[in-house]
Structure formats: structure tokens, C-alpha cells
Image (cartoon, grey):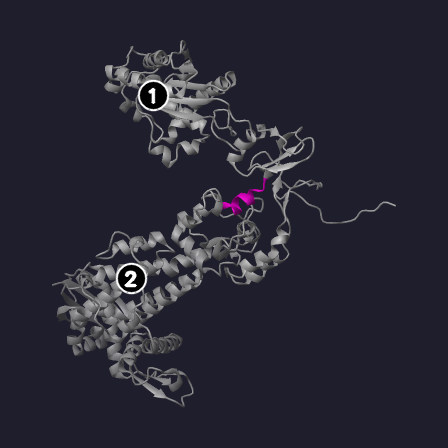
Amino acid sequence: RKEKYKHEYPFCWRCGSALIYYARDSWFIRMSSLRAKLIKENRKINWIPDHLKTGRFGDWIREVKDWAISRERFWGTPLPIWECGSCGNAKVVRSVKAFEDALHASTNSYVFMRHGEAENNTKHLINSWPEPERLPLTLKGNSEAEEAAKALMREKIDVIYASDVTRTKQTAEIVAKTLGIGKVHYDPRLREFDFGDFNGKTYAEYAKYYGSRAEKFVKRTPNGENHTDLRKRVYEFLVETDKKHSGKKILIVTHDGLVYMLHAIANGWSTEDQLSEKEKRGEYYLGNAEFEKSSLKNVPRDETGGFDLHRPYIDAIEFPCGACKKGIMKRVPEVADVWFDSGAMPFAQVHYPFEKRLRKLEYPADYISEGIDQTRGWFYTLLAVSAILGKSAPYKNVISLGLVLDKNGQKMSKSKGNVVNPWEMIEKYGIDASRWYFYTVNPPGEPKRFDETELGKVSRRLFSLLYNSFVFFDLYADKDALKGKISRRELSVLDVWIMARLNKTIASATKSFEAYDIGSAARAAEEFCDDLSRWYIRRSRKRLQRPENERDRATASRVLGYALREVSKLLAPFTPFFAEALYRSLPHAGESVHLESWPSPDRGYLGKTMEETIRKMADVRTAASAALAKRAEKGIKVRQPLASITVKDEKASFKGDEEFMDILKDEINVKKVLFDGSAGEDFALDEAITHELREEGIVRELVRMIQDLRQDAGLRMGDSITLFVDGSEEVRFVVQKHEKKLATDIGAREVHLRRSEKFDAEIETKFDELSVWVGIKKK
């Protein structure tokens, strides 16, 4: 009977077409014989995340399969295997030199010669074909040709070919007469490079036409040719001439550019070789009437004569079978798996094993970073090729990255419509915010669920916060103070704390970087930036905005400036543009943050004492956070002073330390900090508001209001004002009673309890059921 069965079937992941599997012959590398070597080398590698070492990657190499190395494609690196059509003998051609050994080399030898000095040389004029004017050899040029001819007598020249341009004809005739050769063969393919519209002009004019030497191979002169055209015509001449003669020594008299091109073809150079450092030094350009001996290498070439090991040129290489002596060896049609090319990268780039220069490569690499899919791709093939060659692992550390998914955890796909355009995100949030998001969103090897909302949060959480910290510094800090060094004796406990946090962060980030734990290094820097902004700057505002003494302002400026500069260095590897902008915006900056050394922690701010300082400050912040939450819950403004906070003993490492208690009192606006080991709550506020506390609260509310007015009026920090206040009886009473303190806090020379029609800024409002009008005028 006939039934339908439901089963899995392969489809093309690109177009969705059904696929049919066929059994095919293939070439393999027996990797199973290297299993122990692969496992041994993997033990030496540090993997991030570490579970890949014995998990995904470890499982793969423990069950390693033989590597199907061949592919049935046209493009790619041809397999260097030749097979005999008669006996099936296979031969691996190990090098380009092996082609010369296996193939029939040319029986002819060559001498390439440049013409003697001509008038176009002395006038620095281009004189190609057709000759704008007949510019013959100079007297010196004739003499050079005669001397060269005498030297050539030792070479036993059989045949002379030459360009039919005047200067080369004259040179060739002098040589032929001296050597007793009756006929010179003139060939138009040996003429000077076709300069086109530059013919008859100066070389300086021609040189301006090209932006680079590489352009000369692709960009033709107007109505002329390029260097690839020149090589092609010279190559055609060489092939034809070599077939025409056998066992002859052939002299070719031509121009300097053509001598160079003859040299490149004869030696089997590619275009890349011609643009190499050797060629740039001009080692193969001959002087007037100079010559060089050469032979014609038998190597694969493209139609222009350039060395090329790719298809179809290499497929034309055939040679007799050394086994059966009857058949012809032809290359197998397959090309190599492109991953073999990738795996061979460390060796291929230094031309190993032909040039044993692995030391120049600093092999093995310190680290490699790629997607997690490369555990069976590049990570594996690099290790596999190294094992094949008997070498150690090609890298010491691996940072494997998870794949980017959409915010719902789905693979991004155009067909699903869930693709995010990275350029739009970069344009909107900046490249550095995008970088930081991927560094910190989760561990490197985990999938990245990209969510634009989270990217926006990252931008605000770090970059906006840090930018605002810089703006505060730029507005209020004493820039001249940065010239001095930070003196430990002048630091407050807040300064010591932020210096301890900074140096602990540097030490932590350094340790993480050295362990290739990039995410931890980034998060340590981000936590410090949060502490710097939300606590150090918050608690230092009065020191910088309304300092009680300039010495303390200078100290705070110095500490904040130093912290921002070190932060720019910490962020430089992660966010190169933002870090550079921050660094260059600070006073006394160097040329670039990227030319600075990585910061080293100051050991004076590390150790047990500093850890204790950090712990005490953490407890102060915990107490402050709890107290402020209680205020919000009860609807008591922070500007309203309270009598006290009671802290349970186990939550108070700062007990007895007046500086820490002063910070807590100022932050939560209480008069006293009390401690009780048997308290029912960790933190308890005395919520009773006395008349004195209410008066102080009104003063603080007025100070905040007046500071806002100063800003609205565009006044600077040192500007004095005249203050006018009118309002409820209670407000007037409080202003009169606390006039001196109020004037000091706001920088007022005079305080008047009346309205004024002349003011720079004013406000009329209510707070705590009290009506008030306030006006200020610059004094």
C-alpha cells in the first residue's frame, strides 16, 4: 500500500527551496588522528565564557570528524593536487618552485637592457610613440652604449630585439655592431609606455595624474594605457619570442619601464608583488645603458602575464607523470574549503614554511574574539591547521560572543521584519553608547537580546550622568587648582572615599582586563561613575558652588578633575570617542587619551583602612536612602530639618566617626545621629517638628528659591545681590529673625522686608500654606 509519512526535510536557508542530497567524492584531512593533540592544546587556552572549553568546543574536538577539505566550486584556493589520467598517481605540488621543477623550463636565457642617455632624459621630457620629435642619444649616451656593448661581449648574445624608438634603435645598433650581430629585430610591443596625452610633456605633469602607484595598474593615461596594458603587451611579446627560439641568449633593448616589466614577468610577480615594498624602493629600475640577466620562470599566469595561482590559469598547468611515464598529470578540479584559508592565516601571512618567521608574528596570538558560532568555524580551523603543522595552539585566550537577537529572543531576519538597522541606532544614540550596551548587557557568550529602550537607558545611565558631572566641574571648579598635586593631609573623608573608590576601580578593571573579563571591567567603571556623580558631586556641591573657604574648594576641584581624567582613561578602550572628548575638554590635557598609559592604582588608597572607609560610606548611604524614603512616605520635605535619626548598631559601622555622621546629617537634614543596639527598626526618624525646626525649614525653602532666581537672572557665583521679601506674617518673622544667616547663604548685601518694582528676577508662590513674594537685584 501507499502512505504519507511526515518527516524532516532540508530546505535552503536563503531561498526556502527544497534540497536534494547527493553522495559526492571528496578530499579529506584525517583530523581523527590528531584528536589527542587538539585536546591537549585546548587545555592551555583560556576561554571566555569558560564553559565553552569543555562544553561546546571541548565536545566538538573530542568527537572530531575528518575534515572534508574540498569544494566543487570555481572560485577559491585551488587544491594543489595533480592526478595522472592513466595510472591515477596523485602528486601534491608543495610550492611555486615545484612548478619550475615539474614543468619544462624555458631553454632560452635573457638579457634586459635600457637605452643610453638621450636628449629627452636631459630635458626631463616624455618621448613615447609616436615620437613628438626625434631626440637621439647624447654624446654621453653613445659612450654608455659602447661601454655596455663591450661588457655584453662576455654574454655571447645570439639574438637582439629592440624598441623602434630613436634612442633604443641607436643603442641596439651600437651593441649589434660591437657584438658582430648583423640584424636587430624591432618590435612595436617593446616601445616606451604609451603616455597618451602626456607625450611630449614633462614627467612632473604626468606624475600629478595619479593619486597612488596602485592607480597606475587600473587607470589609463588619457588616450594611452595603464601598467596592466603594458604588462600584457610585453608578456605577449615574451611568450611569442620564447616559442620562436630554443637554447638562445636573447638581448632585449628597451626603456626603463619596460625593463622593469620584463623583470616582473620573468620572475613571476603578481600585481601585488609589483606594489610591494621592494618594488617601491626601485631596486629593479635600471640606469641608462645598464642591463641585467634573467630567465623566464614557468609559473601560472593570467592573460596579462601577472602571476596567478587561481583558476583557470592554474588548471592549464600540466606535466608528465613520474610514475607511469606515459600519462599526463592534471590538477583535480576542486578548490579548498575557505575555512582552511582562514585557519592557515597565521602561517600564510608570514609565508610559512618558506620563510620561517613565526617570531615576527608573535605566535601565538594573545587573544581572539568572534561569535559563538565560530567554535566550529574559525576557532576550530585555526587550531586544526596548527595541529596539522605540529604547532601549539594559535591563541592564548578566546572571547566568544553571543549572537544578536531581537528583543523577544528571535533571530533577526528581513522576512520576519524584526531587523534593526545599526546605523540608525548609532545615529540616534552614538556609536559609543552602542558599544557600551553590548559590553554590559550580559556576559560575552550569552545571546544579546537587542532592545532600543535598554540602549536609551544605557546612554542616560552612563553618558548623560558623566557628561553632567563634567558640566558641573566646568562651571564651578577652580581650574588653576589642577596644577597642584593632591595632598592627603588636605582631604576630607569624602575626598578620601572617592579616591579609594577610584583606585579600587582601577585595580579591579585592570584585573578583569588581564583575565579578558571585559564585562566586569566595564561594569566596575560604570559603578564608579555612578558613585562620582550621585554621591561625591552631590555631597560636594556646597564646597564648589558656595565654598566656606577657597582652600577646600581647590581640594575638591583637584580631586574631581583628577577623577574625571582617570575615568576618561578607564573608558578609552570601551568608548574611544566619548573618552577622547572628555579627556580633551579637561584642563591641562595631553594630545590624546589614547596616547596615555593605562592608569595604575595608587597603593596608598588601597588596603584594609581604605576598605573600611568604603564600607562606612556604604552604610551611610544605606541609612540616608532609608531615611529619605521614610521622609517621602510621610510627606516631609528634605528641606525641613528634623531632630534626629536612630540607627541600629549593626547597621552603623560609622558609629563614633564624626565626619561620616556629619555627611549623613547633612544628606537627610537631621540635627543628631543616635545609635541603639536594641532598636526595633534599622533606621528610625524623629518626625516631630518644633518651632525652631519649622523656622529653619522656611529659611532653607527661601534659600532654594533665591538660588533659582539667581540662576534665572544670569548671576555668577561671586555676584552680590539685594534681597526683597514680602508675604505671610510667619515668613516675615522668620526672615527678620534669621536675616544674617539668610544673607550669608545667598550672597546678599542687603535684605528688605518689602516689595520692589526694580528687580532682576522675582517669584510669587506658596509653600506649606505660606504666601511669599521674593525679588532680587544685582548689587
- Furthest residue in direction front, as rendered: 154
Residue shown at 36%/83% (left/top)?
652
Q: Quadrant of the C terminus?
A: bottom left
* Picture disc at residue 461: none
Residue shown at 30%/75% (left/top)?
667
Q: Amino acid at mark 1?
A: Ala
Residue 590 in magenta? no
Q: Amino acid at mark 2?
A: Leu
- Residue that badge 2 annotates: 564
| Dot 2 alpha-carbon crowd within 10 angstroms: few under 14, some 14 to 19, many 20 or more | many
Magenta range is: 336-345
Magenta stretch: dominant secondary structure: helix
Residue 247: x, y in percent? 49, 20
Q: Quadrant of the N terminus?
A: top right
In this picture, is 286 found above or below 20? above
Determine the secondary structure under disc 2. helix
Contact between labelled residues 2 and 1, with CB atoms less than 8 Å apart: no
- Furthest residue in direction top, as rendered: 182
Determine the secondary structure under disc 1. helix
- Residue that badge 1 annotates: 151
Whole-number angstrom distance, CA of label 1 to CA of label 2:
74 Å
